[in-house]
Amino acid sequence: MDSNTMQKLARFKIMARRLGGFNVDIFRMAQEPSHAREMLQRAQEVESENLILLAMELYEALGLLEETQPKASAKEPLAARDAGTGKDGGRYVFGARG
């Protein structure tokens, strides 16, 4: 864990206690992703923009954000997706009258 993340965890502990009224075990947060998610979700319920922004930064720093995978079919050209299908490679070979 880098020093920047450790500083964020320390600030989070102090802000959560001061603004949210709940205690945070930062060592447990660093080791258990489920506990970290629970504490960060709890922080999002507090009406403090600074605490919410810090929680979002920690989601990213602790690797808790799930990145969405783009659909391969949406990125590939139609010809590349259909290549290799059928006995003619997916190409249309007959005219309108057969």
Image (spheres, helix red, strand yellow):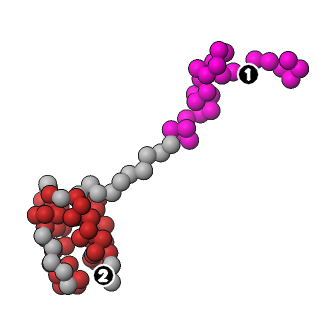
Residue 4 visible, this angle? no
Q: Main secondary structure of the magenta part?
A: loop
Residue 5 visible, this angle? yes
Residue at (18% x, 59% y) in the render: 32
Question: Residue 21: within the magenta?
Answer: no
Sequence-first disc among 1 and 2: 2
Element class at badge 2: loop
Residue at (20% x, 84% y) in the render: 21
78 to 10, vertically: above or below = above
Residue 15, x across and y down, in percent: 19, 79
Disc 1 to disc 2, how far (Cα)? 60 Å
Residue 28, x across and y down, in percent: 13, 63
Residue at (61% x, 27% y) in the render: 82
The C terminus lies in quadrant: top right
| Residue underneath mark 2 | 46
Q: Which residues are magenta?
A: 72-98
